[in-house]
Amino acid sequence: MMKFRTRLIFGILIVILFVLAALGVLVGQLLKGSYVDQLEERLGKEAALAALAMEDMDTQDMQQFSENIQDRLDVRVTIIRNDGTVLAETAEGADETTDIHVPEIEQADESGGTNIRYSSVNEDESLFYAYPYTRNGESGYIRLALPVERFGDINQRIWLFIGISFSVAFVIIMALSYRITNQLTRPIGQVTDVANELAKGNFKARTYVESRDEIGQLTRSINILAYNLDQITSRYQTQQERLEALIDNMGSGLIFINDRGDITLINQYCKDIFDADTDQWLHLVYHEVIQDTALIKLIQQIFLTETKIRQQVQLNSRIEVHHYDVYGAPILGEKEQLRGIVLVLHDITELKKLEQVRKDFVANVSHELKTPVTSLKGFTETLLDGAMEDETARKQFLDIIWKEGDRLQGLISDLLELSHIEQEFFQLNWQEVNVTRTFDEVMELLYPSVRGKGLKLNSHKEEDLMMDGDTARIKQILINLMNNAIAYTPENGTIRAEVRQEKDSIVFIVADSGIGISKEEWPRIFERFYRVDKDRSRNSGGTGLGLAIVKHLVEAHHGSIDVESAKHKGTIFTITFPKKREKE
């Protein structure tokens, strides 16, 4: 496609060429006519002068007079009487008489007459000028003739001059037109380039034409437009990025479904909810990718009723069950037309767990308190009914009441201790702990219990181990783990206790060859009142709160606790503490 500048230049040059050609023809004709007029005027003056000179001239002298005029003026001279008799003729082969009914003679008046016509004597076109004369009562005409071919050279020179002049003028005008056109079209080209860049989305493009005319106003308007588009786009991109970041990082699942049932937006949190690559769900029908029946029914219900719905849904993953509070709402456009729906899935699994833990805690506390209280009440009533008179029965019942009271006291103490540890204001008594000495004290304290049950204790320690922590709490952790090992290990079993240093950590290991824990029960052993073997633990005086206390105290020291166990193959607890206290 021809550019605007080329079309403009081409159009201007065609117009200029047409105007110059027309002007050249007009000027040529004018110059030619002017030259002919001047030539006629000259011939008229020369003829008038010759006629004046003939007034006193004899007839025999006219031929000589005519030849003299021809020699001086280089023209053909003919002197004719009114009757057509030729008195003098400078052209060879001319007749002695001539026709006086020719245009130049017929048109001749006091100032003469002129005409351009073909001459049979000269056999070419000539310019004739006839002027009347009067001599001695005799009248006639003196006629001067000039061949037209003589001013053909003049005409050629005129056209050559016009051609050269107009060619130079055309070149100059063409150069000026090209420069002016460039000055006019270059800004337009720049504006066009900027407009094309804007259409491609490059809002940083600018044009740099400094002028105060309409072109300058256009360029400034384009620059302002580009700046505004750049600002609007930047704000839009910023808002879009913020919205995308908000949607992808919000703590809930978000799904948009259009009126055809296609998923048009789904955030990253849904990958964890559905345990799948939800990026592949875009532009797919929801019931083809969502497997949960309850959620599909909820979506269908929103489509059918076009009302907001809130419902709790249970979704099963490969590892565990999650509970979600699902809020669905229709998206309505103009004239209440359904455009789609939006779903928000909020994970309430922890709330469900906490609710279940609370229920279990109340039930367990009630159950744990009911047993000793019932025993205390029952044996007390038995004594009051007369058993106190029997010394043997009295002593036996009082021993039972003592044990149940001691058990009740231990349970209440552990509950108070656990409640205290879980308070926000709970603080450890941080100090430098001699780990080796603490380990020895615990082993020495519990050795009688180990020996009394017929167990073998293997202990290993590294000397001079030091760490930042709370000595009493670390001792409490070891005592609880050792008591569990003693309680759940049958007679002739083995308990291994070890403390060592690994890089910047202190590691405690308590292992036993007891009844063990199945892998399914690992996540629950740190729950309150949870017992692997309820009868064995209750008979040993355990409250079911020891491992819960251990877990909270380890976390307070910024440590970690791991368990490895199998049914009837023993249990290994590994606790790792940082040597230096982490700054909070």
Image: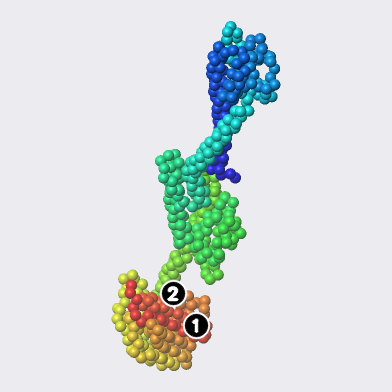
Q: Which image quarter holds the N terminus? A: top right
Res 378 → quadrant = bottom left
Instruction: Give coordinates of residue 32: x percent, y percent.
Output: 57, 27
Which residue is drawn at the image coordinates 60% and 23% (left, top)?
70
Q: Amino acid at mark 2?
A: Glu
CB-based contact (under 8 Å), mark 1 and mark 2: no
* Residue farthest to the top, as pictured: 137
The residue that disc 2 covers is 527
Which scheme is used to colour this image of the protein? rainbow
Mark 1 crowdedness (10 Å alpha carbons): few <14, some 14-19, many ≥20: many
Instruction: Give coordinates of residue 546: x percent, y percent.
Output: 40, 79
Q: Is residue 468 above or below residue 181?
A: below
The residue that disc 1 covers is 565
Query: In this view of the protein, which residue sits in the foreground, 398 or 321?
Result: 321
Q: Earlier in the sequence, mark 1 or mark 2?
A: 2
Query: In this view of the protein, which residue sits in the foreground, 18 or 501?
Result: 18
Whether residue 84 is visible to the viewer of this picture, yes or no, is: yes
Q: Is residue 357 above or below residue 86?
A: below
Instruction: Give coordinates of residue 104: x percent, y percent.
Output: 62, 16
Q: CA distance from mark 1 to mark 2?
A: 17 Å
Q: Amino acid at mark 1?
A: Ser
